[in-house]
Image (spheres, helix red, strand yellow):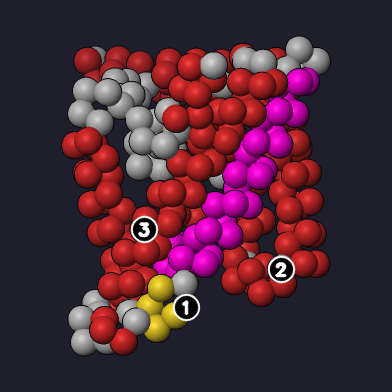
Amino acid sequence: MKNKLGIVLKGLVKENPVLVLVLGTCPTLATSTSVVSALAMGIAATAVLVCSNVCISALRKLIPDMVRIPCYIVVIAGFVSIVQMLMEAYLPDLYDMLGVYLALIVVNCIILGRAEMYAKDNGVVDSALDGVGMGIGFTLALLVMATIRETIGAGSFAGIELSFMEEFKIPILTAAPGGFFVFGCLIALVNHITRGKAPVRKSFDCESCPSAEFCRKGSCTAAETAEKEGNADGNA
């Protein structure tokens, strides 16, 4: 039981997908201008993340290794389509608020990353718990950013005007530069809190890329060959 709880809790702070792993930056910056849109995006992404993790984990032994990424995308796209249709039918205002970013959950790095790094190697229950933990971590990061940006930037919370903030608003926080500023500050804060505990990527070469085996015979090899030829020409 303790191990199961640990799977869920690691996504909250220690391996937070947004503030530690720095994934899903696009929807984070785009939907964190409002608490309502941030919460809606977080719940939608969590639902897709959990369902896709469960499905991919259940099918992991049936999916050929060489086509697993396309298969993952098809599975994720299926669940995103379901979420879109449900939201358009029952929550049209939220559907319009999220706009294109709802459909872009298909290419959200958090969802594809957890499928590749966790669901394909673990059981259904553990994969579901991982999805829950990462989804909650994603939602919390969005809510914290949205609260700061909407409260201080727009002088409101969840669309409710805060009269006492009228004279203290900093409108730039609702714009892109303000979003990056808040994002950077939160990353720095979490990095300070998790000092020595959060995972650190030590290498950014091809060997550390989860897709290296796919492009080894293609782009990576071509790049390495070109680099070697360039060095040879330079030495000559």
- The local crowd at label 3, few if under 14, some if 14 to 19, many if 20 or more residues have their Cα within 10 Å, is many
Q: Which sits in the foreground, 155 or 97?
A: 155
| Residue identified by numbered label 2 | 91
Determine if residue 107 is in view: no
Q: Secondary structure at mark 1?
A: loop
Between 182 and 227, which is closer to the camera in this rendering?
182
Q: Quadrant of the C terminus?
A: top left
Q: Please name the residue that numbered disc 3 is placed on.
A: 145
Res 93 → quadrant: bottom right
- In 3D space, how far apart are the residues under numbered discs 1 and 2 (Cα atoms)? 17 Å
Q: Which residues are magenta?
A: 30-59
The percent coordinates of residue 5 (x first, y second) are: 50, 24
Q: Residue at x 47, y 45 (%)?
A: 138
Q: Number of labelled discs?
A: 3
Residue situated in front as seen by the camera: 43 or 121 = 43
Amino acid at circle 2: Leu
Which comes before the other along the chain, label 1 or label 3?
A: 3
* Residue 229 drawn above or below residue 78: above
Task: Identify residue type, mark 3.
Answer: Met
Counting residues from the start of the chain, the first of labels 1 and 2 encountered is: 2
Magenta includes 71?
Answer: no
The local crowd at label 2, few if under 14, some if 14 to 19, many if 20 or more residues have their Cα within 10 Å, is few
Residue 41 sits in quarter: bottom right
Q: Quadrant of residue 217?
A: top right
What's the amino acid at mark 1?
A: Gly
> Mark 1 and mark 3: span between their CA atoms?
15 Å
Residue topped by disc 1: 159
13 lies above or below 126 = below
* Residue 176 on image: x %, y %: 35, 67
Residue placed most toward the observer, 93 or 70: 93
Residue 51 spot, x, y in % from top left: 71, 36
In the rendered view, tell whether residue 153 sits above or below residue 74.
Answer: below
